[in-house]
Image (cartoon, rainbow, N blue to C red):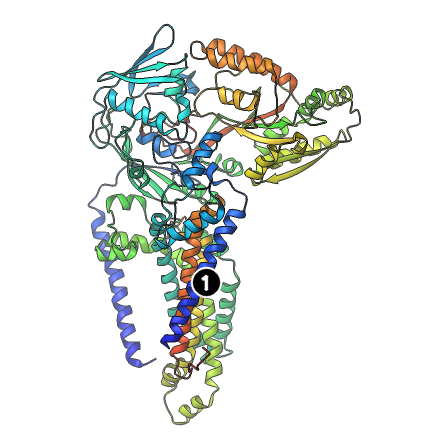
Amino acid sequence: MWKFIIRRVAIGIFILFVVVSTTFFFSRIVPSEPAQKWVGAHATEEQIEAAKIELGLDKPLYSQYIKYLGDLLKGDFGMSIVSHRPVSLELKNAIPNTLELVILSVILAFAIGLPIGVYSAIHENTIFDHLGRFISVGVISMPTFWVALMLQIIFSTKLGLLPLTGQMDTILKLTNPLDKITGFAMLDSVITGNWRVFKDLILHAILPILTLMSYSLGLTSRMTRSILLEVLNEDYIRASRAYGIKERIVIWKYAIKNVLGTVTTVLALSAGYALVNTFVIEAVFSWPGIGSYISRSVINLDYPAIIGVTLFASVSYIILNLIADIIVALDPRIRFVKGGD
Amino acid sequence: MNMKYTKVISILLVVLITVVAAGCSGGEEQQGNDNTPKTVTYVTHSDPMVFWDPAETWAIEIVALQNIYEPLVRIDPMNDNEFIPVLATEWKSSDDGLKWEFKLREGVKFHSGKELTADIAARSLKRTIDLGKGAAYIWDGVKEINAKDDNTLEFVLERPLPMLYIVSSAYGSYIYDPDLERDWYYEGNADGTGPYKLNDYSKDSEVILEKFQDYWGGWNQDQFDYAIVKIVPESATRRQLLVRGEADIVEQMPLEDVEALKSDDNILISDITSYQQLYAFLNTQKAPLDNKYVRQALSYLMPYQDIVDHVMLGSATQARGVIPPNLWGHGKDLMQYNYDLDKAKELLAQGGYPDGGFKLLYTYTAGDKNEQKVGELFKDALSKVNIDMEIRGMTVDSKYDLAKATDPNDRQDITMLYWWPDNVDPQGYMYSQFRTEKEVGFNFGYYSNPEVDRLIDEAIAISGTSIEEATEKYIEAQEIILDEAPAIHLYCENYVRPYRKDLKGYADNPAYPNAVFFYELSR
């Protein structure tokens, strides 16, 4: 088992290296003039030349690449071409905001999707089942940016129940400043007992989280339903029922165990999907996270920032995959045979 | 799942819900205690914070920085180029124009509490010049900057310069604390003498400015305690925020949205002619546009009015010459080409192309809808005289690469360029775009005329002593340029900004593009 995990981690590191290298070279092959962007639109030739030296762009690409890798190992992501600030600093501020959305949406998708799936499976082919399936197929198929806009129009513009954009009300930020402890705003507001801010944060997060969880929710409930239906037809379930064990216990104790493994695996992967989805959603909700950051960086071909985000996204993906693999590996029926996984 | 776990989870859920509920109700109790501060909100489409060091500033960060830092003097182009004393209260120049003295305002404090002295002012400008970044070149020709006494700043010049136009520049003209380091600024800090200090910055979200209690101008109760620059990339969302009253002023709205907002009783629209002018440069070194008559014919074929009406939806003014209106050097009696098919046919015949029959390449920056639409309308107009045109959208860099190809015959025939000034001086429009260049910079017509070169040089030299004489020279040069038509002068964009009707004191100043002076506002 440990051998398996170590192998996985080693492969992960190798993938990271490949990802960093390809992003580095691809973002440099695309025609762009980073030095020009660094100094401004009306810069003179001399200013551009000076900027090239300052940014190390005067050196051949391979030595830039080696230097970049070296800096990366030291945790230095370089300077953003657009904002002239260290990418690591900007990532440090943006990542918690995005993770907050992703984690909450995945937890909620699981907490809501699983019971719906179970209920659908038990009441197979009833109206509820059809409705549930209709909704889950629907939310998977709807483009997220459209869902986001619709939620905004309904809950914010028409009903006026929830804020339109942003993470937190600005005036509240001034009257009840939030101390930064972990960088996760909601967690910080709980730790410091800043309840007004906490409430405001929740209100602002509802629409983005609803948008983000729609896909995972649909996926979870559908997966749960179909796997549970399969499991319920197996012999050991029939045997349990024949013993006269209560149906509730049959499902929640015996059947669900065989569902959970697959569903959590799917969920871990859908967290990766949610992470990518924030790229679109954050722009719509003006959410100050990784998604807003990458869209601005791509528009400006800000390559240190692009690599920084890519790196973060790949690390997340690798970790999520690892989690999924470990969950599968925890199943005692899976054995580690020499020479194979 | 074991029943025990179910229980544990249920308990956790109950606890969580209670905490949330407690949090919410706790909030209600506190609500009555604080008086809400007065805030004004300006919504922009992208994060303005590009340059943090006041010596380097050269982009839209002036949206915030113009409120944090101050120059010696500001200029009001909408009011006959009046100079407004800011950190300098009076100024005078020597008779030969080689020495300028600025008296500094007394009792000015930095946000840090430090007092402003002539020594600090002199050293901050010297730092800007020494760093040589951003718009530092505006100080070219300044030999020395001295602190004559505690509040007299002296400039010694190599040649007479239009100093007031330089010290009032939107970029590179700030007086700041020269003892602060560049890194400190880029950690997200600022320290100026302006009415607002930086309170908080969250990237891609907002910049919060807080009123500086000790500001030399003092405060009255109608002014704002906080000024917020909010970043909202979605234009539909920006519009919503304005309509709901959560935004006071909005930058960069699609003109279709502006049209719709005009019917809202709570919203006013500020619409002024900016300095941003669009040019179509004609390749004067490649056939057939090396022929003056063909270039003139093309100038008559541009459907100017349709472009202003349908591309810009009326939010633009047809250009008259190289230099935009409101900027000195503009000639209000200069000739203007207008769409005239017959004249164009006549000129084409004169140029040796009575039946057209050639093909042109039009390049523009991909993504710029206006340049693209101009291209489409122009192509349509050209087809009437049997001229074909390929419209090619390119990235800025590849567009420039093509425009700078070694052989002029490899370059495009027509390319689009916007120009705007760094300070209120027409020099850039004339010098960078129409003066002979050894290596191609921004003169994309590849135009070279010794007479025009001489006039531009003379205008620049004399601008230090007499704006009137410099204007005459520039007008003379523009007459030649208009006749020889190395470029088609399209339109000058208007800055259109919808804002809330109850906001008092808002006046857009084109010399400081996109900036809002929050100190002037009240409600």
Q: Position of residue A307 (x, y in %)?
A: 44, 52
Query: Label 1 belongs to which residue?
Result: A15
Q: Position of residue B194 (x, y in %)?
A: 29, 28
- The residue lying furthest to the bottom in this view is A243
Three-letter amino acid code at the position of disc 1: Ile
Q: Which residue corresponds to the image point at 53% horizontal and 63% vertical from the top-left?
A: A141
Location of the N terminus of chain A by quadrant is bottom left
Q: Position of residue B57 (x, y in %)?
A: 38, 32
The chain containing the residue under callout 1 comes to A
Within 10 angstroms of label 1, few (less than 14), some, or many (20 or more) residues?
A: some
Depth check: give the residue in front, B231 or B420. Answer: B420
Q: Is residue B497 above or below residue B428?
A: below
Depth check: give the residue in front, B484 or A58. Answer: A58
Q: Which residue corresponds to the image point at 50% horizontal and 64% vertical from the top-left?
A: A140
Location of the C terminus of chain A by quadrant is bottom left
Q: Position of residue A325 (x, y in %)?
A: 42, 73
| A138 with respect to A84 (left or right) | right
Depth check: give the residue in front, B29 or B438. Answer: B438
Q: Which residue corresponds to the image point at 44% horizontal and 9% vertical from the top-left?
A: B466
